[in-house]
Amino acid sequence: MLKMMMLFLLSGFFLLSGCASTMYTWKGYDNKLYSHYKNPAEYAEYVENLKEIIEAGDQSGTVPPGLYAEYGYTFYVQGYFTQSITYFQKEYDKWPESRVLMAKMIDNAKKESKKAGKGAM
Amino acid sequence: MNSGIKQLCLIVCVLAAGCATPKDYTKFNAASPRSLLIVPVVNRSVSVTAPDYFLSTITIPLAEQGYYVFPVNMVKSLLENDGLSDANLVHAAPTQKLCELFGSDAVLYITINKWEACYAVFTTQVKVELYYVIKDGKTGDVLWEQQQAMTYEPQNANTGNLLGNLIAAAVTAAATKAAPNYVPLAQQANSKAFKYPGPGIPPGPYMKTSY
């Protein structure tokens, strides 16, 4: 009986340590990206998934590297340049390694936004 | 008797150690990259979807190993917009140039050599074979490389009688034929290839230390 309990406890610890073993909150990012490649037409769903991942990690500061950028880029390709800049800036602030690319993207988004603004007038 | 067992143990240990050729990490440690740029995957398999599907598996293990991993889908898209949708072209381009463009410390190049299912009547074997190489953004030198193969044969349920077994196996084979699942296999290959110590990649700057 005691042995059984010990075993039970032990397996519980293993399960727990399994849960806590990732540094970042991924929320199945790999599966989401896979589905995106499988069904590229369902772009809105991919965007929504990225948003969920970011929301899940935001409070605890465990948004994985690249995710703000990836989400910002979905705005960029859809022509929502102001929103894209917000997320490129977040990536820039959180990850020094991203700064060269993010500075370029922010710059591009600003230019595109100006162009789009002129077109609208 | 006892010493015989000891000797046997020793032999086994030596054999096991001999199998894993120790890697030279001097260059890697000297460069100690903080960030990895993953460029589109070169595909030598017959599956057209393999490179994209594979790309979805690569970020998590490397980020969890403590590296800044550039957003793979965005990078792919940016390269395509610049007329670099051909992975072979990207792989042939100078590493320094790519790193300069993205501000990355190093580039991870991946080649898919095999991504296939071998169909027999009652069983299906799924196979992936990958080649990984990390090159330094400053010198273009190879910092690390690894070849990794993985095979998976779906476990057949034993129903206790021959006919039952055959039917179960046929069902499994049919299921795999409809949609062979390569992704878990690719994930396994990644975790095996990146494992450190082992053949893998030393922990990056964001790796939480356990002490």
Image: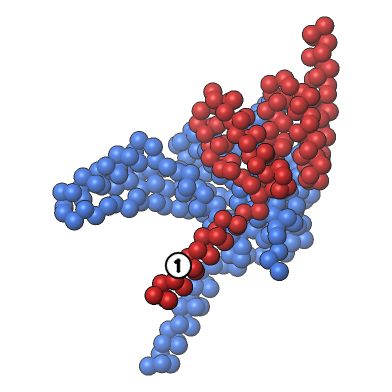
Residue A96 pos. (x, y %):
81, 46
Drawing shade for chain B:
blue
Residue B90 pos. (x, y %):
66, 37
The answer to whether A85 appears left or right of B59 in the picture is right
Going by the numbered disc 1, the residue's amino acid type is: Phe
Residue at 67 percent of width and 28 percent of height: A74
Drawing shade for chain A:
red
Image quadrant where residue A70 sits: top right
Residue B119, placed above or below residue B21: above
Residue A114 pos. (x, y %):
84, 17
Frontmost residue, B110 versus B198: B198
Secondary element under disc 1, as helix, strand or loop, is helix
Frontmost residue, B35 versus A42: A42
Residue at 80 percent of width and 40 percent of height: A92
Name the residue that disc number 1 marks. Answer: A8
Frontmost residue, B58 versus A116: A116
What crowding class fits label 1: few (fewer than 14 Cα within 10 Å), some (14-19), or many (20 or more)?
few
